[in-house]
Image (cartoon, rainbow, N blue to C red):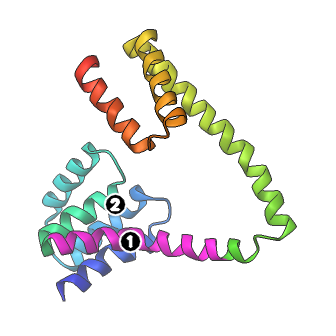
Amino acid sequence: MIYWQIFLAFFLPGILGYGGGPSSIPLIENEVVDRYGWLSVHEFSEVLALGNALPGPIATKLAGYIGYQQGGVLGAFIGVFASVAPSLLIMIALLQLLYKFKDSPKVKRMTNYIRPAIAVLLGMMTADFFMTSYRDVGIWQTLFLLAASFLLMEKWKIHPAYVITLSLVYGALFLS
């Protein structure tokens, strides 16, 4: 029964919390403090403060912590799944709809309009990362990492996950 309660406590705010994590925080508080009594208002505020100090979406951090507190590892899994399930279901429905109309001229035109915007956004993000790296570690370290990453991925076909891991190790050893 506790797992069903955990699911409902985070699924309902996920459905009703239009606007992301900040708009769902009061709904989560209502569920875990008022409805189920798992936390006091003070405890919830401490969990919220801790969650805000960590990177990532606040709703999933709250769901993971409170789910773990109430139902162990399975409770944490159920809580996190319940908090992302509404978005996941909507995405699946929209993808099925898009797949159904993938050959439509309007859908093709729409994707042709979106691709350049995504390319520009990715280019801007890359330029920001490059400039931040240049300012923080210098041009030679930045160029070395850029060239090494390019060669590893393009010439030797190393998976990007391994290149990122190697870059993190390099940074930890030589740039910290």
Compared to 113, does 147 lie above or below?
A: above
Q: Residue 68, percent across and down?
A: 16, 68
Q: Are marks 1 and 2 in contact (CB under 8 Å)?
A: yes
For residue 12, which quarter of the picture? bottom left
User: Which residue: 74% across, 43% down?
Assistant: 116
Asked if one can make out residue 114 in the rendered structure from this viewpoint, the answer is: yes
Dominant secondary-structure state across the stretch colored magenta:
helix
Q: Is residue 94 left or right of residue 128?
A: right
Q: In terms of secondary structure, where does tag 2 sit?
A: helix
- The residue at the point 38 percent across, 37 percent down is 164
Question: Which quarter of the figure has residue 36?
Answer: bottom left
Depth check, mark 1 against mark 2: the one in front is 2
Q: In the displayed structure, would residue 56 be above or below residue 157? A: below
- The C terminus lies in which quarter of the figure? top left
Instruction: Check the picture and name the quadrant holding the N terminus.
Output: bottom left
Dot 1: what SS?
helix
Which residue is label 1 attached to? Answer: 13
Where residue 157 appears, as percent x and y from the top left, is 49, 40
Q: Which residue is mark 2?
A: 59
The three-letter code of the residue at mark 1 reads: Pro
Is residue 176 among what the camera can see? Answer: no
Magenta segment range? Answer: 73-96
Q: Amino acid at mark 2?
A: Ala
Q: CA distance from mark 1 to mark 2?
A: 9 Å
